[in-house]
Image: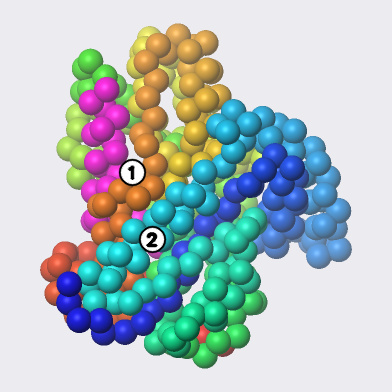
């Protein structure tokens, strides 16, 4: 371990997940009340009423997803990541306090800020670390907007807005895919299905880079993995009647089945932790759909969770953001989206 050089608060942003079935409807209400999610002419007047309607309509189905996996594990995984990241940064000479700021359920951003302000010693710097590898105004953008509304501190603040091109992050995804492929009798013959959380096409048409970031992530993962498997990209978790990115996961599974393929390896490419969209939507419901389509062998890669490679990637991003010497990131060649953001 090297000498401690500074005290840094690291705010790790995530979407959040319910802590009980009774919290499903208020969680959805918070989600659909977000102006970065629901935006239309005069939306300020109708957003709350629409959010109330959508949350009531979708609560029962969403609760079934949560019940199928025994509740959302996203807070547990995110807090495990925080402890592992603290330990890693301490080894690199940074006394870090990692807090979790969920966007739509506890602990909210205001709770994370209170944690930082209750620290015994003053912080030298704060790093904002959204756990969304690819940038979207609906995820990273929304979390950072909430931070700016809540944060009143004067501590120098830095932000990592996207890390989908980071080599160590890509390596952690490749590792998970190798693990999943090893469970097949003939790994090289299995189609890889990359599934990303969908967004409305209207968001992309406004200039959001999310789709491009997802496509580049898949390209980089396939290059580094070096597999000969055919692969395809699809999107999941559509809400409402508007047009979303396609093809959907359901459409893609049908396509795989129509090719007389009987195996599929699903890679949740926009998620870093296992939660309801992976364990419920993919590993439970999509698995059953695949079985009915004749896909007998269905495997899903594990979330990155607290993978040592992934934690190492996050630590290096934090160090790069606060301007530590290159040696502190173990001479890794990386391209980071970290940049300084002066706090209000």
The residue positioned 37% from the left and 25% from the top of the image is 299
167 within the magenta span:
yes
The extreme bottom residue here reads 154
Numbered disc 1: secondary structure: helix
Residue where numbered disc 2 is placed: 83
Tell which tag, 1 or 2, sits nearer the viewer: 2
Query: Going by the image, does 53 lie left or right of 299?
Result: right
Give the residue pinned by disc 1.
Answer: 218
Q: Residue at x 24, y 77 (%)?
A: 93
Q: Is residue 335 visible?
A: no
Above or below 289: residue 230 = below
Q: Image quarter for residue 157? A: bottom left
Residues in magenta, as a range: 162-183
> Pointer 1 and pointer 2: residues touching (CB < 8 Å)?
no
Left or right: 198 as drawn, with respect to 55: left
In x, y percent, where is residue 82? 41, 61
Choose between 97 and 134: the one closer to the eye: 97
Task: Pinpoint residue 232: horizontal percent, then vertical percent.
Answer: 37, 32
The residue located at (23%, 26%) in the rendering is: 182
Q: Secondary structure at mark 2?
A: helix
How many dots with numbers?
2
Residue 186 position (above or below residue 115) = above
Q: Position of residue 32 (x, y in %)?
A: 72, 53
Query: In this view of the protein, which residue sits in the foreground, 236 or 24?
Result: 24
Q: Position of residue 127 (x, y in %)?
A: 42, 75
Main SS, magenta region, reads helix
Within the image, what quadrant is residue 105 found in? bottom right
């Amino acid at each position: 371990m090297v000498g401690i050089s500074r005290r840094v608060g690291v705010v790790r942003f995530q979407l959040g997940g319910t802590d009980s079935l009774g919290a499903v409807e208020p969680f959805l209400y918070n989600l659909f009340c977000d102006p970065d999610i629901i935006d239309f002419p005069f939306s300020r007047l109708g957003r709350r009423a629409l959010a109330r309607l959508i949350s009531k309509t979708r609560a029962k189905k969403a609760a079934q997803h949560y019940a199928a996996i025994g509740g959302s594990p996203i807070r547990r995984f995110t807090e495990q990541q925080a402890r592992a990241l603290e330990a890693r940064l301490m080894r690199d000479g940074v006394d870090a306090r990692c807090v979790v700021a969920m966007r739509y359920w506890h602990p909210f951003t205001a709770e994370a800020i209170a944690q930082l302000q209750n620290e015994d010693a003053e912080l030298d710097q704060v790093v904002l670390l959204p756990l969304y590898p690819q940038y979207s105004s609906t995820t990273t953008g929304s979390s950072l907007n909430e931070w700016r509304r809540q944060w009143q501190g004067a501590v120098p603040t830095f932000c990592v807005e996207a890390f989908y091109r980071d080599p160590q992050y890509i390596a952690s995804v490749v590792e998970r895919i190798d693990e999943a492929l090893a469970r097949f009798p003939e790994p090289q013959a299995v189609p890889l299905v990359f599934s990303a959380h969908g967004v409305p096409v209207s968001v992309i048409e406004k200039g959001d880079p999310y789709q491009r970031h997802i496509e580049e992530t898949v390209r980089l993962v396939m290059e580094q993995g070096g597999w000969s498997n055919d692969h395809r990209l699809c999107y999941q978790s559509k809400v409402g009647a508007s047009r979303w990115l396609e093809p959907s996961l359901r459409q893609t599974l049908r396509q795989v089945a129509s090719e007389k393929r009987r195996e599929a390896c699903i890679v949740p490419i926009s998620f870093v932790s296992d939660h309801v969209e992976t364990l419920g939507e993919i590993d439970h419901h999509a698995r059953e759909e695949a079985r009915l389509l004749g896909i007998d062998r269905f495997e899903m890669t594990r979330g990155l969770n607290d993978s040592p490679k992934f934690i190492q990637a996050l630590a290096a991003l934090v160090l790069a953001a606060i301007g530590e010497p290159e040696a502190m990131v173990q001479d890794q060649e990386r391209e980071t989206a970290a940049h300084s953001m002066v706090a209000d």
